Image (cartoon, grey):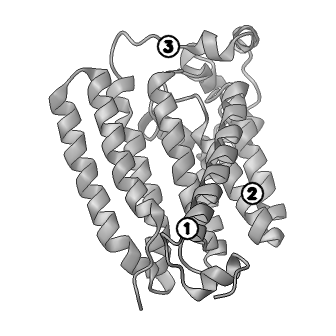
Amino acid sequence: MPKQNDPLDVISIVYGLSIAALIGILVGQATTGLALLLLNLSVGLAALLALPRLRARGGLRRFFGVTLPLLVFYLYYRETAVVLNQRGITWLDRLVAGPEMQVWENLASDPGSPFFGEVFALGYMAYVPLLLVVAVALLRDPNRGPTGHAESYVRWVCISWSVCYILFLVIPVLGPRFAFPGLQEPRMGDGPFSFIARLNGDHGMVRGAAFPSAHVAATAIALWSVWCWRRAWFRWLLPAGLCLAVGAVYLGYHYVVDVLAGILVGAVAVAFDRITVRRRLLSGSWSPRPTDLRQEGKPP
C-alpha cells in the first residue's frame, strides 16, 4: 500500500524549526536555539519518514500514524517553558483580561464548592481522552489522505496549537491561578480527578501559557469535527467539552477572554486549512487518491 502523505508532515518540521529559532531569539542564547533546532529537526524528520507509512496501514498502526503528530506538537508546547520560565518577564494579564481582572480580585477569597471542583476537574482532565476518542471515531472514514476526516481533524488541532504557542511567547499571560495565588486550591475537590488535575497543573502544564486556551481551541475543533462527520457522537461529547471550558475558568486556569480566544483560534485554524488544502487540490500540486476526489465531490 502506498504511503499516505499529509501536509502536516512538512508543517511539523517547518514549525519546529521556526519555534526553536523564536525561542533562541527570545532567550538571547544561540546555543539554546541551536539545540532546539537540532532536536525539532530530528523529531520532524522521524515523523516525515514514519508517519506516512503508518497512516497507509490499518488498525492500531493507522491510529498511531494519524495521532502521533499530537505528541510532536506537545513537545513544542513544552519548549515554550524555556522562555516562560525566565525571570523578569512582563506578564500581560491586566492588558489581556482588562476589566475581568477586577472580577477575579473579588473572587480570590471565594473558596467555591468542592463538589463542583471535582466535577470540573473531571471535565478538564477529559481533554486528552476526548481528543483521542474523536480521532478513533473519525478513523472510520474510508477516505484517506489530506481530506480524510481523521487526518483533517488532527491537522486542524496541530495548526491551532501552533498559533497558541506563538501567542504564549509574544503575549505571556499567567492566568488566574498564578495571578492570584491561593485561588485555585480551595476550589479543587478532594477526589481523584482533582488529585490528577493538581499533578497535571504542577508537572504537565507550562506556567504563563494561558492566552489563548489551547485546551479550548482543540476541544472546539473536536466538537466541530464530530458535528460535521459523526453527528451521533456530538450529543455525547458536547457535555464534556462544555464542562472543560467552564472548568478552565472555574478552576482558575484561564480567564474568560482566554476561552473565547481559544474558540476563535480553533475556527481560524479550520478555515485556514480548508482553504489551503482545497487550493492545493485544485492546483494539482497534490495528487489525491480517487476516494479523496469523491469526498471533494469531483470525478476521479
Horizontal arrangement in the rendering, residue 83 relative to residue 193 (left or right) = left
Judging from the image, what secondary structure is the residue with disc 3 in?
A: loop
| Residue closer to the observer: 193 or 249 | 249
In space, the residues marked 3 and 1 are separated at their CA atoms by 44 Å
Residue 224: mark in rendering? 2
Q: Position of residue 87 (x, y in %)?
A: 33, 13
Judging from the image, what secondary structure is the residue with disc 2 in?
A: helix
In space, the residues marked 3 and 2 are separated at their CA atoms by 32 Å
Which residue lies at the image location 50% right of the left edge and 85% below the top edge? 59
Q: If the image is split into quadrants, where does the C terminus sit?
A: bottom right
Number of other residues with Cα within 10 Å of mark 1, as a class: few under 14, some 14 to 19, many 20 or more: few
In space, the residues marked 2 and 1 are separated at their CA atoms by 27 Å
Badge 2 amino acid? Trp
Closer to the chain start, of discs 3 and 2, is: 3
Judging from the image, what secondary structure is the residue with disc 1 in?
A: helix
Residue 283: mark in rendering? 1
| Mark 2 or 1, closer to the camera | 1
Residue found farthest to the front: 283
Residue identified by numbered label 3: 91
Q: If the image is split into quadrants, where does the N terminus sit?
A: bottom left
Residue found farthest to the bottom: 1
Closer to the chain start, of discs 3 and 1, is: 3
